[in-house]
Amino acid sequence: GQKLTIIKKLLEVGRSSCVRSTLAVQTPAQTVGVFGEHDSDTVFGQCHNAIVFRHADGFGQSYWSRRLGRERGTEEKRSFTRQVGGGSGGSSWSESEGRNFERFDLDRVSPSEIGDLPVGSYEFGMYGFA
């Protein structure tokens, strides 16, 4: 491909002037190959929205997974046990309840989910992430 430096400038100036642009690439590797990694991130960073369809290449899968972000939070896990026992002196029982909070830091969309998307068709429509 050919590097058109005006695209980067148009996106930067256009965004501040409320100009809407549409970029279509088969894989981010194409843009990185033409603009380099830093300028490619700048070009994609100027886009307000992204629609990600199936990617067969690992670079495209990981790139869009990173761009779609991560989800962080905590999840409460509860456990409950009850024991009942008996002997010659009668029966006895005990209960215990536990609460545990676990942190998680996960991809919102994993690279494999992007790679496993079905190919769209006229009959069933398109599949992707936005």
Image (spheres, helix red, strand yellow):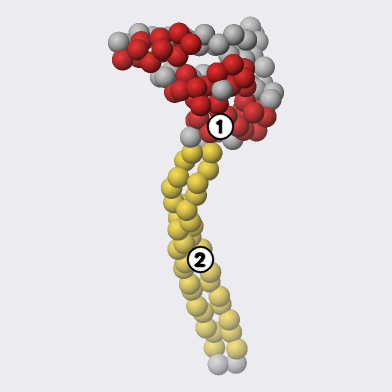
Where is residue 108 shown, x and y percent of the image? 51, 36
How many numbered marks does the figure carry? 2
Whether 53 is drawn above or below 74: the answer is above
On the question of residue 27 being in view, the answer is no
On the question of residue 73 being in view, the answer is yes
Give the structural element (helix, strand or loop) at label 1.
Answer: helix
Residue lying furthest bottom: 89
For the point 63% across and 7% down, the residue is: 122
For the point 46% across and 23% down, the residue is: 42
For the point 38% across and 15% down, the residue is: 12
Q: Please, what is the three-letter code of the amino acid marked with disc 2?
A: Phe
Callout 2 environment at 10 Å: few (<14), some (14 to 19), or many (20+)? few
For the point 43% across and 18% down, the residue is: 47
The one of 44 and 93 positioned closer to us in this rendering: 44
**Is residue 22 shown left or right of residue 89?**
left
Where is residue 28 shown, x and y percent of the image? 59, 21
Whether 74 is drawn above or below 6: the answer is below
The residue labelled by disc 1 is 65
**Is residue 104 shown left or right of residue 115?**
left
The residue labelled by disc 2 is 80
Contact (Cβ within 8 Å) of mark 2 with mark 1? no
Give the structural element (helix, strand or loop) at label 2.
Answer: strand
Question: Which callout, 2 or 1, points to the residue nearer the camera?
Answer: 1
The one of 64 and 38 positioned closer to us in this rendering: 38
Classify residue 126 by image quadrant. top right
Where is residue 116 shown, x and y percent of the image? 67, 27
Q: Please, what is the three-letter code of the amino acid marked with disc 1?
A: Ser
Whether 113 is drawn above or below 74: the answer is above
